[in-house]
Image: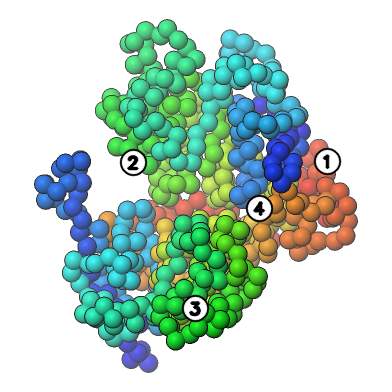
Amino acid sequence: MTAQPPLLEVQSLRKTYARATGVFAAASTGERFSAVDDVSFQVQTGETFAIVGESGCGKTTLARMILRLIEPDTGKILFDGQDLRLLSPRELTRQRRAMQMIFQDPFASLNPRMRVGEIVAEPLAIHHAELNKKQRLDRAAEILNRVGLKEDAIPRYPHEFSGGQRQRIGIARALILRPKLIVADEPVSALDVSVGAQVLLLLQELQQEFSLTYLFISHSLPVVAQLADHIAVMRAGKFVEFGPAEFILRSPTADYTRTLLAAVPEVPRQPNL
Amino acid sequence: MIVRNLTVELRTQTGALKPVNEVSLQIEPGQSLGIVGESGSGKTMLSMALMGLIPPGGRVTGEMLFHPGTDSPNDSQKNLRELDEAGWRSVRGREIAMIFQEPMTSLNPVLRIGAQIEEAILAHESGIAREVLHARVMAALQQAAVPEPEFRARQYPHQLSGGLRQRAMIAMALAAKPKLLIADEPTTALDVTVQKQILELLDRLRREMQLGLLFITHDLGVVASVADRVAVMYAGRIIEEGATGEVLLNPQHPYTQGLLAASPRLQRAKLLPIPGTVPQLTQLPPGCSFGPRCAFHRHDCDEAIPSFRPPQSDHAARCVLL
């Protein structure tokens, strides 16, 4: 049954940085700290694997290494059976089509001087040079429609849209290449509650429809609880524990996970809704 | 503090708008009132009005009755709206203090923490002896539970962690012993474990100092843990108000119900988002501002702004359905 290989497998990934102690001290002391310290895990096709941790725990560094935006010191990243670190630049570009990212800040991650149609169609211009501009914009219109935006968005600029709409534009851009894996780094933490819920539901629908695998990075356990199949709790560069979501949320074994859960300010439950 | 029918009107290129519209509320000493709203609800403009910091050209109407308390040298109620800038300077920081979401942007990056707290004290009490001033700074830092106050007072803001910076901000805000503290999303930028400590600190301080606390947040979970009473704002108006437990467990207004159903909890449940987006203040629909997004919308919603129902009640909401 479980003979299918994982879509993503990370083995002993490590990244250290020089610790800066002052303007001139940085290079000389040679002291280093581990942003990501010997992390290994597997993500199965079609699941949502969430990495939860507080600021500075290394979750974003880890995500960026998987997308090969940051070079790891040591370790292996196997995506779809291929070791990403051994690929030539050309092969890597091809493989990148299958892995896309959604960012936290919908205000900073869209080029303010590009029209929405160009933003969404840009990945096609890079990876599908055979398409002409008309074809690219047609595809952009189609995918914008799917994420809940109308076609009249195409000639407009990002500043004309609300935070939630901009996040939908970012999702459309990530989806247009029909990727297998989407890395979502805090995709709802900059949004209002009611809008954040819209985006979370959209991500769930799209996962079904496009058989997507999500690597979901967040500081918020309540958000992660809504859609994760597996949860890894990260602290100081290491996985404190990981396992099935219900297990981590209901009966965590690590003290740190319990502390995190206890610190969540919970809305009282209403019996009548 | 008693606020009655407070309205802030701003003139913009796209026309006049009212980010705060007929807001009435009351905060007793030692009590904490939570203001909940999404972006654009007017919650921050409300706090700015209460600090006399409305942008130039803005017009404020209504009453802001402030009673500094019997232990204060000028024990008389005053309507803050009638104050001029000099009058505001004697109130701001002294009687009413404020802390913000991002302490890094509200602290001066080139001044040591201790010097900034001294400044906050000297602004209202000039001519304090050096030793007394130093003792006051230490007391303020200790009150905000800053560990190693002597050492921290000599540090610069960038040398402190986010949680310590927020504690330093609280120390600065409380150094002049205000009666009312306005906290505008003070924990939004912090990690949950640090947030919990700051919320506990604020809760302890308001009880010990009999401080009125106006806590502004978008997070219903945070409001549940700090506020005695809660007011929910939408498009500039308070649409529901009551005791926190009452409002969160038995919400009356469809918007409050919608916010609760859209809030993620640790228990997995299908989230029910509110359709649409918060309306632009320049293009408010007639009648109830929430009407176009409301599942229970009917034609009389569009006729007039609903009044609070039941009237004069401890827990009331602006909705025609009630």
Query: Is residue A273 at least partly visible in the picture?
Result: no
Q: Position of residue A55 (x, y in %)?
A: 36, 53
Q: What's the mark number on residue A176?
A: 3
For the point 34% across and 61% down, which residue is it? A60
For the point 65% across and 43% down, which residue is it? B42
Instruction: Tell me the amino acid under the disc marked 4.
Output: Leu
Residue A149 or residue B96, whichever sits in front: A149
Alpha carbon separation for disc pair 2 and 4: 36 Å
Q: Position of residue B280 (x, y in %)?
A: 69, 52
Instruction: Tell me the amino acid under the disc marked 1.
Output: Pro
For the point 17% across and 46% down, which residue is it? A26
Q: What's the mark number on residue A252?
A: none
Which of discs 4 and 3 lies nearer the camera? The answer is: 3
Chain letter belonging to callout 3: A
Instruction: Tell me the amino acid under the disc marked 3.
Output: Ile
Q: Is residue B208 above or below residue A99?
A: above
Residue A130 or residue A106, whichever sits in front: A130
Find numbered disc 4 in the image and state the secondary structure of the residue it sits on: helix
Q: Is residue A40 above or below residue B291?
A: below
Find numbered disc 2 in the image and state the secondary structure of the residue it sits on: loop
Is A162 on the left or on the right of A60, as rendered? right
Report whether mark 3 lies on the same chain as mark 2: no
- Give the residue at mark 1: B311
Q: What's the mark number on residue B161?
A: 2
Alpha carbon separation for disc pair 4 and 3: 42 Å
Q: Earlier in the sequence, mark 2 or mark 4?
A: 2
Chain letter belonging to callout 2: B
Which of discs 3 and 2 lies nearer the camera? The answer is: 3
- Specify few, some or many for label 1: CA neighbours under 10 Å numbering under 14, 14-19, or 20 or more: few
- Give the residue at mark 4: B249
Find numbered disc 3 in the image and state the secondary structure of the residue it sits on: loop
